[in-house]
Amino acid sequence: MKYCTKCGAELTDETKFCPSCGQATEAKNENVNNDAKKEEYQKKIEDAVTDFVNTKDETDGFDPDDINKNKALSILSYIGFLFIIPLIAAPQSKFAKFHANQGLILFIAEAVIGVASSIITTIGYFIASFIGGLLSAVFSLVGIVSFIFIVIGIINAVQGKAKELPIIGGFRFLK
């Protein structure tokens, strides 16, 4: 059962216009459909974000003492080339090595993307300044994603978790 949005009169589902005031009832049904579509779209976005952030968690495989001793070193793993410091300062720490590996992968990905973006953007500017500017903006967004990965890695290290970074975290260079 539905009701008129103008006068509140009770209407049947088939009613197109309110018999009391003449208000059209289709607009309300469209709003209800739009609200349902918005909720469905929002749910899809939430699911995608959850899938993106919920990566493999290997924390249970690490010694709690190792985790507590090497959290600070693990944080350094995500700050550029400082991923090497945990490898030098705590070579026996599996936890520090895990985060150093994540930092190394992120560092390599950032370097490759940086070189590729420079080349591609330069070619884009050579073709047309609009294309170069557009490509530059796209690669700026990639930089933001890289920053988000850094934050995720640091948060995982601070919390004593051995969780892979989204997308790139499954690669292993350090055993």
Image (tube, helix red, strand yellow):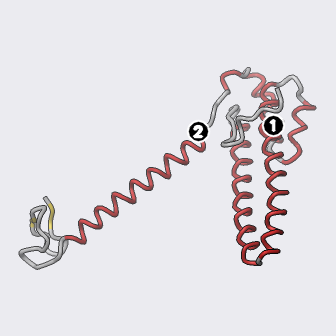
Look at the picture and state if 35 lies above or below 22.
Answer: above
In the image, is residue 132 above or below residue 102? below
Residue ranking furthest to the right: 88
Q: How many marks?
A: 2
Q: Position of residue 127 (x, y in %)?
A: 78, 75
Q: Earlier in the sequence, mark 1 or mark 2?
A: 2
SS state under label 2: loop
Gap in Å between the C-alphas at discs 1 and 2?
Answer: 23 Å
Residue at image location 11% in from the left, 64% down from the top: 14
Q: Residues within 10 Å of mark 2 (few under 14, many from 20)?
A: few
Name the image quarter holding the C terminus. Answer: top right
**Front-most of residues 77 and 104:** 104
**5 or 120: nearer the eye?**
120
Q: Which residue is mark 1?
A: 72
Q: Where is residue 50 drawn, in percent x and y? A: 54, 44
Image quarter where the N terminus lies is bottom left
Looking at the rendered structure, the secondary structure element under dot 1 is helix
Percent position of residue 157, x then y: 73, 37
Mark 1: amino acid = Ala
Amino acid type at mark 2:
Asn
Could you say which is closer to the camera, residue 12 or residue 79?
12
- Residue that protrudes farthest toward the front in the picture: 127
Q: Which mark is residue 80?
A: none
Q: Quadrant of residue 32?
A: bottom left
Residue at (80% x, 25% y) in the render: 94
Q: At x 85% / y 57%, what residue is drawn? A: 115
Number of the label disc, if any, that sits on residue 54: 2
The label nearer to you, 1 versus 2, is 2
